[in-house]
Image: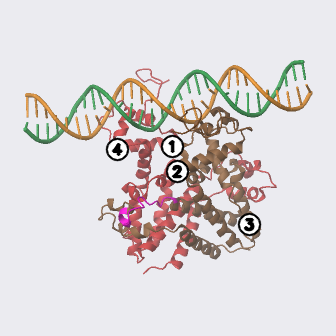
Chain colours: A red, B brown, C green, D orange
Amino acid sequence: MDASPAGRALQEEAEPHPDGKLTRERMLACALEIVDRDGVEKLSMRALARALGRDPMSLYRHADNKAALLDGIAETVLAQLTVDPTDPDWVAQLRAVAHRFRHLALTHPHVVPLLVTRPLATPLALRPRGTLRPLEDILALLTRAGFTGADALHIYRALFGFLHGHVLNELQEIVENPDETDDLLRLGLHRLPIKEFPHLRGLATTLATYDGTAELERGLDILLTGLTTTTPAT
Amino acid sequence: MDASPAGRALQEEAEPHPDGKLTRERMLACALEIVDRDGVEKLSMRALARALGRDPMSLYRHADNKAALLDGIAETVLAQLTVDPTDPDWVAQLRAVAHRFRHLALTHPHVVPLLVTRPLATPLALRPRGTLRPLEDILALLTRAGFTGADALHIYRALFGFLHGHVLNELQEIVENPDETDDLLRLGLHRLPIKEFPHLRGLATTLATYDGTAELERGLDILLTGLTTTTPAT
DNA sequence: TCAGTAGACCTACGGTGTAGACATCAGTCT
DNA sequence: AGACTGATGTCTACACCGTAGGTCTACTGA
């Protein structure tokens, strides 16, 4: 098919020994690449090793488990979420964080399940530090704004609870067949019996036009106005 | 060790042929049992078959895939969530639904990842009907209360986004070592460097006493008051 | 009576995570 | 220089996984 020197049909994703040593960072970066491209369930230790041009067992020098590897992926993504704890306008900063989080989630949709799910397996304090950084920084931001620690924690929880829910929601708004013009058909809603699901079928058009940014903004409005009225600072 | 007739040390979780035929319901019930007891990753087709006293391949008569099996589990749990679309007080009904959802999640903590994650794999309209029932019923409830379909959908999304986030949050508040009295030690927070995580360490006591019901109630207050002010009915 | 069918079973294939032993090599201490 | 040490990579092997394909059996309707 192609003009590669030795006629090996298999895809060689990496040279046999990509010069330097295998670092944890390189391993995680490559793993993230695979997950982004093919989804989590396509990531196996063997596939990752193949992509790195190494022996599968090498990986265990840099991650105890496959579980630890997944945690590492979630960490590398979450570590990209920056918070400015010195921002004097805490509401604006939380909004900005929310949008950055959404952007991150949309950039790595296949990682979102890990992002919301992996923490369940590890108690808070044992989590990798990159995961705890945003929490610490938001606590700092809110403390500086005059909230008590307890209130700051509540706000953090409310915000991230909402954010996790939102990106999960947004990611599952998948259009089944983009070619079809009729919304009912496009979404496959016609398969549902009209008598049992009248409202759902009636909302075909609304379901077909989902605006994630607007939806997020709306939710943030509700959340933040609710917060400022029920939990005043200082 | 025990007085079983033939000295088989292996655990026999079910009689070889539990009288009747294998139904989808029985299969899903048994699968749910395994997941509740041992977690999702311990559920294999072979293990499930063993528990049912059947051949692994029998299962494929009642579920196309393992993925379909997981969807089935999520469905059986979510189908237990009841909504009364005739309740004249829609706010109260949504509160009740939220509490029932939380209760369900705490009863089946190992299923929560499936609950929030499986929908990502299946477009809305192709999802099993049990999964769509709550959505349809809440749309009915809100339409009856005077909301437009679009607003009803927004409210549903906001509520379930928040709910998913909340239960994910609540489930990861796990105490590492209940015997230890010092909160800092109990949560393992002492492992974090003080200079990098001062706020987090300072909140040890607050973190150690997490009241899920109160937290949910607070969130609902914010959400529902926010909703009623920004999105009036009729 | 016989064809058709649905359910259960068996075998087998290619994949998985990872334990354990060994090889290689850099750096350090004597 | 030589020995020792620890980190890193490699190889083999094991138990387990999801499931394609075929076969046996029991029941159904014609």
Disc ID at residue A40? 1
Q: In the rendered image, is residue B200 in sight?
A: no
Q: Is residue B33 magenta?
A: no
- Same subunit, tags 2 and 4: yes
State the CA–CA distance, disc 2 to disc 4: 22 Å
State the separation of the CA atoms marked 3 and 2. 30 Å
Front in this rendered view, residue D23 or B68: D23
Task: Give coordinates of residue A165: x percent, y percent.
Answer: 56, 59
Q: CA distance from mark 4 to mark 3?
A: 52 Å
Discs 4, 3: same chain: no
Callout 1 amino acid: Val
Q: Is residue B179 magenta?
A: yes
Q: Which residue is mark 3?
A: B141
Q: Which residues are magenta?
A: B171-185
User: Please, what secondary structure does the residue beneath circle 1 have?
Assistant: helix
Q: Is residue B96 left or right of residue A5?
A: right
What's the residue type where badge 3 is placed?
Leu
Mark 3 and mark 2 in contact? Answer it, CB < 8 Å. Answer: no
Callout 1–callout 2 Cβ contact below 8 Å: yes
